């Protein structure tokens, strides 16, 4: 039986968020979908930046709120596809682009405001609920769906 697995991570600084993002990056099994949901200011973009850092991406990672999508390539060839659906009411506008990104065997697809993303195109995914606790503290609750994502979560939790 394939059951959901969960992990909670409290971050009291950007350095602690970096450690979580780098742990995720170092244990990735591509392709993978990472859905980020939660509060405004909950640390979604900060976590994507940390994942990019862990992948060795040196480009400046910014929120694609107005562009909806940005793409970054790591030195090892992993492609970080960063979507922000905040300004969308549904995912139909970008569904084809999301499907294409997930079809790439070297992709990590991070979707901010994924609650707008109703057509999950990947059985293997991490869902990260990002909670604003205080100015310096965030709580990340990570759920893993699918065997590959669950194995990743076990490695991250070590």
Image (cartoon, rainbow, N blue to C red):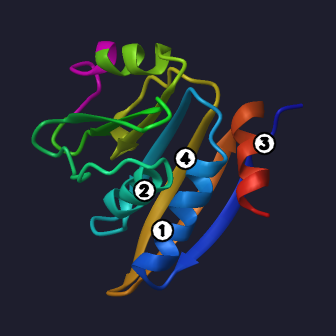
Callout 3: SS? helix
Q: Residue shown at 26%/21% (left/top)?
A: 94
> Which class describes the residues within 10 Å of circle 1: few (<14), some (14-19), or many (20+)?
many
Disc 2: which residue? 53
Please state if 73 lies on the left or on the right of 63 as rendered: right
Kindly report which numbered mark, 2 or 3, lies closer to the viewer in this rendering. 2
Kindly report which numbered mark, 1 or 2, lies closer to the viewer in this rendering. 2
Kindly report which numbered mark, 1 or 4, lies closer to the viewer in this rendering. 1
Disc 3: which residue? 151
* Marks 1 and 4, the one that precedes in the sequence: 1
> Which class describes the residues within 10 Å of circle 3: few (<14), some (14-19), or many (20+)?
some
Residue 144 is labelled as none
Horizontal and vertical percent position of residue 52: 41, 50
Please state if 138 lies on the left or on the right of 83 as rendered: right
Horizontal and vertical percent position of residue 153: 72, 50
Q: Which one is in front, 115 or 20?
A: 20
Please state if 37 lies on the left or on the right of 83 as rendered: right
Q: Are marks 3 and 1 in contact (CB under 8 Å)?
A: no
* Marks 2 and 4, the one that precedes in the sequence: 2
Q: CA distance from mark 4 to mark 3?
A: 14 Å
Image: 145 above or below 18: above
Q: Residue shown at 70%/57% (left/top)?
A: 156
Kindly report which numbered mark, 4 or 3, lies closer to the viewer in this rendering. 3
> Is the stretch drawn in magenta largely helix, strand or loop?
loop
Q: Are marks 1 and 2 in contact (CB under 8 Å)?
A: yes
* Marks 1 and 2, the one that precedes in the sequence: 1
Image: 57 above or below 122: below
The residue segment tinted magenta is 89-96
Disc 1: which residue? 18
Asked which quadrant contains residue 41, the reply is bottom left
């Amino acid at each position: 039986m394939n059951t959901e697995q969960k992990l909670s991570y409290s971050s009291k600084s950007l350095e602690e968020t970096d450690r979580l993002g780098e742990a995720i990056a170092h244990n990735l099994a591509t392709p993978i979908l990472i859905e980020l949901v939660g509060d405004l200011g909950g640390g979604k973009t900060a976590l994507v930046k940390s994942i990019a850092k862990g992948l060795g991406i040196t480009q400046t990672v910014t929120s694609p709120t107005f562009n909806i999508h940005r793409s970054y390539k790591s030195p090892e060839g992993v492609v970080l596809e960063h979507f922000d659906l905040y300004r969308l009411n549904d995912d139909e506008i970008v569904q084809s682009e999301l499907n294409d990104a997930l079809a790439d065997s070297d992709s990590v697809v991070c979707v901010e405001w994924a609650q707008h993303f109703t057509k999950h195109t990947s059985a293997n995914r991490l869902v990260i609920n990002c909670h604003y606790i205080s100015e310096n503290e965030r709580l990340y609750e990570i759920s893993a769906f699918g065997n590959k994502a669950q194995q990743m979560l076990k490695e991250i939790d070590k």
